[in-house]
């Protein structure tokens, strides 16, 4: 029963019971993978990657065991997400109930960690959960590393003295040779303002410079040393195929301003590896350290690991196959991942008419805000669960049906056709679902059976009409 897989019975996660309600949408397949903690498994590529990044931030406290069940307050409110922010949608977030969810990012812990001890810097590495697309670089569970560093104005005689210290710290950071592309303006008065009511321009600028240099150092150092190892092992460095290219682009987060994303050139395209910015001062005020100023970042560990080891498919991180796990050793220099088998892909298409929209327009790729009803009592959320009538189809519903039905045998789900009938006004969608197991060749019958089950779920849950 998707997306309203709420039941009366409570959910047990990590030995703790949580009541369910009409917000509950976390499926059993996700809960079954909860708690694997790949980022701390010895010799797992995500753990190796985490340690490499941590090593570039000496003196930071490393939090690697914060629980993934958090409150709506921690995940959104503490960071200044507005009540109608789309990230709160049940289409994007796994709710345990209206107050509790599986964290969607490691930023959920920022305020708590600052409140507990804001001195020096910290990292937080953890599993995070999102209802998201299905393809080779997206998985509904992935791993992030948060990092933050602040300075306390109270430690200095004046604000100018604090700026001076940050400037000294900046000059002590390792330097690198790489020319980092920076095509967009570093600040934008409306879209990405300096927090002028809280920070002098000098404070914001030196914090930003320290942040960018620190992250550039991290990326350049770990990729250059991986390259050296690969060359020494005769495995061909990344640089031989494509020289390292890195760029900054403008980004937006409720909890930082100004904000940026760092992208790395990979196989002919820019791949976003992290988001970062100057910490929103109200966040630090909420955390009880109003005189601290500083920066924060959030890195996708899988993205870095895929680049470092040449891992082609994000599903592989979940493999328990010794042919995968046996290739990584944290005591040894980086080696390129050797694919152990590539089984054939089995693409299947499904075309359907969306139910005739009497009232609101049914949309495939945006949350169905047109059908909103009042919020549940006491909840911050503006988007209600759908009751009674067949739920409005959202693309992430198909992603989830595919995952729940075919598990890791589904490699990719892509919209390949979308058209509105000129006479009837009905909308038709066609998705191509690519089946491919990492472990074995799927027979035609197996692929057909998976496809049939997904198709039937779609009809049963969303009242679509197959074409
Ligand atoms: C965030 O989650 C922010 N909280 C990051 C941040 C922290 C910004 C602190 C400022 C200060 P974003 O949604 O872009 O931002 O995710 C951060 C990184 O996680 C991305 O750059 C990407 O590397 C990775 N990521 C995001 N979604 C996925 C996914 N579905 N699969 C794998 N990696 C992902
Ligand atoms: Mg992003």
Image (spheres, helix red, strand yellow):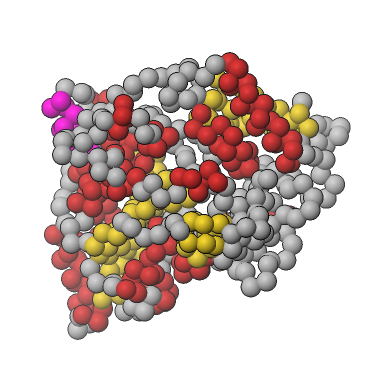
Location of the N terminus (image quadrant): top right
Is residue 424 shown left or right of residue 144?
A: right
**Residue range (magenta):** 223-233
Q: Residue at x 13, y 59 (%)?
A: 172
Look at the image and say whether residue 463 sits in the magenta stretch: no
Q: Is residue 300 above or below residue 444?
A: below
Is residue 17 shown left or right of residue 225?
A: right
Location of the C terminus (image quadrant): top right
Q: Is residue 333 above or below residue 292?
A: above
Q: Residue at x 23, y 52 (%)?
A: 54
Is residue 392 shown left or right of residue 179?
A: right
Q: Residue at x 34, y 36 (%)?
A: 306
Does the rendering let one see residue 173?
A: yes
Q: Is residue 200 above or below residue 185?
A: below
**In the current view of this chain or complex, which residue is farthest to the bottom?**
157
Main secondary structure of the magenta stretch = helix
| Residue 49, position as x, y percentages in the image | 27, 43
**Image label count:** 0
Does the rendering let one see residue 363?
A: no
| Residue 448, position as x, y percentages in the image | 63, 21
| Residue 35, position as x, y percentages in the image | 41, 50
Out of 7 and 318, give the one closest to the viewer.
Answer: 7
- Residue 434 figure quarter: top right
| Residue 202, position as x, y percentages in the image | 29, 70
Q: Residue at x 77, y 46 (%)?
A: 390
């Amino acid at each position: 029963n998707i997306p309203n897989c709420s039941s009366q019975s409570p959910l047990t996660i990590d030995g703790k019971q949580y009541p369910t309600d009409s917000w509950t949408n976390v499926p059993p397949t996700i809960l079954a993978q909860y708690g694997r903690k790949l980022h701390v498994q010895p010799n797992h590529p995500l753990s190796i990657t985490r340690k490499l990044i941590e090593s570039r931030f000496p003196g930071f406290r490393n939090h690697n065991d914060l629980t993934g069940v958090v409150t709506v307050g921690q995940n959104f409110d503490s960071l200044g997400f507005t009540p109608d922010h789309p990230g709160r949608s049940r289409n994007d977030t796994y709710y345990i109930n209206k107050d509790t969810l599986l964290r969607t990012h490691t930023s959920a812990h920022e305020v708590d960690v600052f409140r507990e001890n804001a001195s020096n810097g910290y990292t937080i590495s953890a599993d995070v959960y999102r209802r998201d697309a299905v393809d080779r670089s997206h998985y509904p569970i992935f791993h992030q590393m948060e990092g933050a560093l602040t300075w306390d104005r109270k430690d200095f005689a004046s604000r100018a003295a604090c700026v001076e210290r940050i400037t000294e710290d900046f000059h002590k950071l390792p330097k690198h040779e790489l020319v980092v592309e920076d095509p967009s303006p570093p600040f934008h008065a409306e879209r990405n303002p300096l927090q002028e009511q809280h920070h002098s321009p000098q404070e914001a600028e030196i914090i930003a410079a320290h942040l960018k240099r620190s992250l550039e150092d991290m990326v350049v150092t770990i990729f250059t040393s991986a390259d050296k190892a690969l060359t020494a092992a005769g495995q061909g460095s990344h640089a031989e195929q494509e020289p390292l290219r890195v760029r900054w682009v403008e980004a937006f987060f409720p909890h930082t301003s100004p904000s940026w994303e760092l992208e790395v050139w990979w196989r002919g395209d820019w791949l976003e590896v992290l988001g970062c910015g100057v910490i929103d001062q109200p966040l630090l005020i909420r955390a009880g350290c109003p005189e601290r100023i500083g920066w924060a970042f959030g890195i996708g560990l899988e993205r870095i690991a895929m680049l470092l080891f040449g891992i082609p498919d994000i599903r592989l991180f979940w493999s328990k196959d010794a042919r995968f796990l046996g290739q990584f050793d944290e005591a040894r220099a980086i080696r390129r991942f050797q694919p152990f088998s590539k089984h054939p892909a089995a693409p299947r298409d499904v075309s359907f008419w969306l139910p005739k929209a009497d009232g609101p327009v049914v949309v495939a790729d945006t949350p169905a805000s047109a059908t909103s009803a009042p919020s549940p009592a006491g909840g911050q959320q503006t988007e209600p669960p759908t009751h009674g009538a067949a739920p409005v189809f959202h693309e992430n519903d198909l992603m989830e049906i595919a995952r729940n039905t075919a598990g890791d045998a589904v490699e990719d789900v892509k919209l390949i056709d979308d058209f509105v009938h000129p006479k009837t006004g009905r909308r038709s969608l066609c998705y191509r679902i690519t089946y491919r197991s990492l472990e074995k060749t799927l027979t035609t019958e197996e692929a057909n059976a998976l496809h049939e089950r997904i198709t039937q779920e779609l009809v049963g849950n969303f009242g679509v009409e197959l074409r």
